[in-house]
């Protein structure tokens, strides 16, 4: 029989609880710094994606204020399981760094060998010094623009293109109103009134979603592209017959003279968009017409385009309103962050599923396509040719695995 004193001693005594202080083997250590690029409001991970990663045993370190631009606060991230830090140096202790914008000069100084860097390249603004610094740090860098999925498409480019396409029509609608310097035209039209005419240059994802939004508002559209397959695909995806044409200068010039809105959505894989509309064509457009140059991040497809920003998004030239903001997705930062985070978190989750990043590269051709620096070696042929740096074939670097 146990006396009462002994019973009380072992039943009521508080014992310390041992907490895990290290990640289990195979779990990821992810850092998300706050974006400091001009007018960049998006964040690489949203609280819901952080919760997914943390619930699977991964460690996520977030710099304080990372979600402010997208209306996510630090409490949201903390409750999702992230660690909130105020020193950017602590974020860059992680093995995987996730960025929405390219690394800044300060951030590249914090890199360490064998880190995985997920970020965009922004080809028009890319400098050789940036590439060489990443190479000297011996990191592995993955560009969102080059990442492919199992279907062979570019998931990050596609989701941002969908946002840009839909947003371009909404922006045009605002620019046509009196309050924004336009002629006071309602995009879409009314009963017994002719609809607004919109010319769309490019039948890719941006052009398709711009066409969807325009048709939904009741506008009349004209779509131009030199890729006949893209024109057929657009009509098939929209589910109705619309005016389509190859880019014939005479036909295009005629259509521009009566257009209320022109959307420039020409994408180039080489990083520089071709100039489709010259200044003379712009001069012949209607007074008060609107140009939305979505291709401005690749140089623009209008001769009169000049880069603007979200604070001063428009300018007028030849009585035509120009909107030439490169980062349209930041205009809807919360939606863009959620879409972006969903794609990236799914990719990150594949790393432990395949037993590590090396195994993922070996198994996934689409992921290999996104790598442009592998452990300090430039592996992208286009970048090597552009900056006169001898590239190394990634497959050769991983030849022992093939």
Image (tube, rainbow, N blue to C red):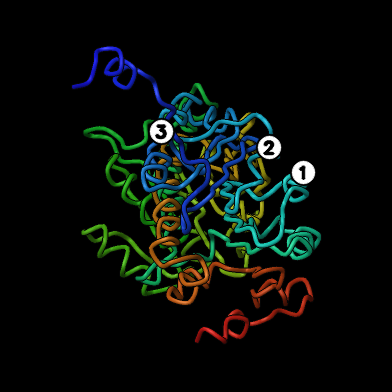
Residue 103 in picture, x, y percent from top left: 68, 49
- Left or right placement of residue 269 versus residue 303 in this view: left
In the image, 2 versus 223, the foreground residue is 2
Residue 376 appears in the figure: yes
**Between disc 1 and disc 2, whose residue precedes?**
2
Q: Which residue is mark 2?
A: 88
**Residue at the location (39% across, 54% down)?**
346
Q: Which residue is mark 3?
A: 80
In the image, 277 versus 388, the foreground residue is 388
Residue 44 in picture, x, y percent from top left: 51, 44
Q: Nearer the viewer, mark 3 or mark 1?
A: 3
In the image, 213 versus 247, the foreground residue is 213
Residue 96 in picture, x, y percent from top left: 57, 53
Q: Which residue is mark 1?
A: 106
As measured in the structure, the alpha-carbon distance from the residue carrying label 3 to the one carrying label 1 is: 28 Å
Secondary structure of the residue carrying numbered label 1: helix
Q: Residues within 10 Å of mark 1 (few under 14, many from 20)?
A: few
As measured in the structure, the alpha-carbon distance from the residue carrying label 1 to the one carrying label 2 is: 10 Å
* Residue at the far left in the pictured view: 1
- Left or right placement of residue 298 versus residue 354 in this view: right
Residue 232 in picture, x, y percent from top left: 31, 70
In the image, 101 versus 188, the foreground residue is 101
**For the residues bearing labels 2 and 3, Cβ distance under 8 angstroms:** no
* Residue at the far top in the pictured view: 5
**Between disc 3 and disc 1, whose residue precedes?**
3
Secondary structure of the residue carrying numbered label 2: helix
Q: Nearer the viewer, mark 1 or mark 2?
A: 2
* Residue at the far front in the pictured view: 1
**For the residues bearing labels 1 and 2, Cβ distance under 8 angstroms:** yes
Q: Residues within 10 Å of mark 3 (few under 14, many from 20)?
A: many
Relative to residue 65, is residue 23 depicted above or below? below
Secondary structure of the residue carrying numbered label 3: loop
């Amino acid at each position: 029989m146990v006396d009462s004193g002994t019973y009380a001693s072992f039943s009521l005594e508080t014992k310390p609880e041992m907490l895990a202080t290290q990640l289990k083997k195979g779990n990821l250590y992810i850092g998300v710094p706050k974006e400091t690029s001009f007018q960049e409001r998006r964040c690489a991970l949203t609280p819901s994606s952080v919760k997914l990663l943390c619930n699977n045993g991964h460690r996520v370190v977030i710099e304080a204020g990372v979600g402010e631009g997208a209306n996510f606060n630090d409490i949201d991230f903390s409750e999702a399981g992230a660690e909130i830090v105020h020193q950017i140096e602590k974020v860059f202790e992680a093995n995987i760094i996730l960025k929405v914008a390219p690394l800044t000069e300060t951030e590249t100084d914090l890199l360490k060998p064998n880190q995985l860097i997920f970020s965009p390249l922004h080809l028009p603004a890319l400098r050789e010094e940036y590439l060489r610094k990443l190479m000297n740090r011996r990191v592995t860098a993955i560009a969102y623009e080059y990442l492919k999925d199992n279907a062979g498409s570019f998931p990050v480019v596609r989701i941002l293109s969908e946002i840009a396409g839909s947003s371009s029509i909404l922006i045009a609608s605002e620019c046509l109103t009196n309050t924004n310097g336009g002629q006071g035209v309602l995009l879409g039209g009314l009963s017994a009134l002719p609809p607004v005419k919109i010319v769309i240059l490019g039948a890719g994802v941006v052009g398709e979603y711009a066409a969807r939004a325009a048709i939904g508002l009741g506008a009349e559209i004209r779509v131009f592209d030199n890729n006949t397959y893209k024109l057929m695909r657009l009509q098939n995806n929209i589910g109705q017959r619309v005016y389509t044409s190859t880019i014939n200068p005479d036909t295009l010039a005629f259509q521009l003279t009566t257009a209320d809105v022109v959307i420039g959505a020409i994408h180039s894989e080489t990083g520089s968009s071709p100039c489709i509309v010259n200044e003379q064509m712009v001069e012949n457009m209607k007074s008060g017409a609107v140009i939305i140059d979505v291709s401005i991040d690749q140089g623009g497809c209008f001769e009169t385009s000049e880069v603007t920003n979200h604070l001063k998004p428009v300018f007028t030239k030849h009585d035509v309103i120009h909107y030439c903001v490169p980062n349209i997705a930041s205009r809807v930062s919360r939606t863009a962050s959620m879409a972006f985070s969903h794609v990236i978190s799914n990719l990150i989750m594949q790393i432990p599923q395949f037993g590590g990043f090396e195994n993922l590269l070996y198994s996934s051709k689409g992921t290999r396509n996104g790598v442009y620096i592998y452990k300090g070696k430039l592996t992208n042929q286009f970048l090597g040719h552009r900056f006169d740096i001898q590239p190394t074939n990634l497959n050769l670097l991983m030849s022992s695995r093939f």
